[in-house]
Image (cartoon, rainbow, N blue to C red):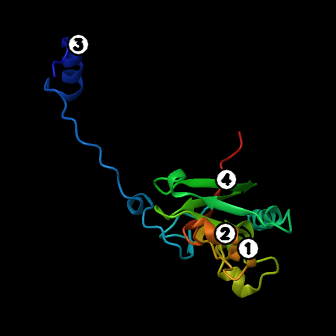
Amino acid sequence: MAISRSLRLLILAITGSSAAPRVLPRVLPRASEICYGESMSLFCYKEPNGTPQNVDVADVKYIGAYLRHYGRQNPNKPAFYTMLAPDTPDCAEWGLYTRGSAQALAKHIGEKTNTSVLYEDIANTIDGGESPTDASKAAAIIGCLSDGGSLGVLTNASNPAYHTTDYTSSGYTLSGILVKIVAAAPVS
């Protein structure tokens, strides 16, 4: 490959060598490397292993209630949140909802799976349920309080919506979505 004089001078100025740069093959990391070892277990962003998000717990409660309400708008057909493997390469994160100091994100951990879960289950993962007990709150992201955190969606596999012909024939799985509560970007 011939390199023009001006390009050779630019390479010399930047690298101190006029040799053509070596082109390395592009190696794509596996999703597990991109996900930074995140797991589906509850992880609170507390020090020393995390960075506290300083979210208002009232905002987190609101997000859970909003997502639950959204999922119930049609009582005869509850709403599903779906993340398909081809649409979510490299463990993509999508915004679910933002309220005040807090933002809920969904991260697709299943690099080869198509995941679809009820909004109600996402809400329960965030706030512990519509009428949460102390134990259900402790097992949900809201148990992390103002630190925020992450947790794989806690699905109610016995929900009839998961046993319809449409759902069972779709090939969707119930696992593979990690929900996160993080600090919302400041509004300027």
Q: Which badge, 4 or 3, comes first in the chain's sequence? A: 3
Left or right: residue 90 versus residue 43 is left
Q: Which badge, 1 or 3, comes first in the chain's sequence? A: 3
Q: Is residue 70 above or below residue 145?
A: above
Quarter of the image for the C terminus: give it.
top right
Characterize the local packing of mark 2: few (<14), some (14-19) or many (20 or more) Cα atoms within 10 angstroms.
some
From the viewer's side, name the closer residue of 47 and 162.
162
Label 1 is placed on what type of residue? Ala
Q: Is residue 125 visible?
A: yes
Q: To which residue does mark 1 refer?
A: 161
Give residue 184's mark: 4
Quarter of the image for the N terminus: give it.
top left
Characterize the local packing of mark 1: few (<14), some (14-19) or many (20 or more) Cα atoms within 10 angstroms.
some
Q: To which residue does mark 2 refer?
A: 167
Label 3 is placed on what type of residue? Ser
Left or right: residue 126 versus residue 71 is left
Q: Residue at x 18, y 34 (%)?
A: 22
Q: Are marks 4 and 3 in contact (CB under 8 Å)?
A: no
Give residue 6's mark: 3
Marks 2 and 1 sit apart, C-alpha to C-alpha, by: 7 Å
Q: Which badge, 4 or 1, comes first in the chain's sequence? A: 1
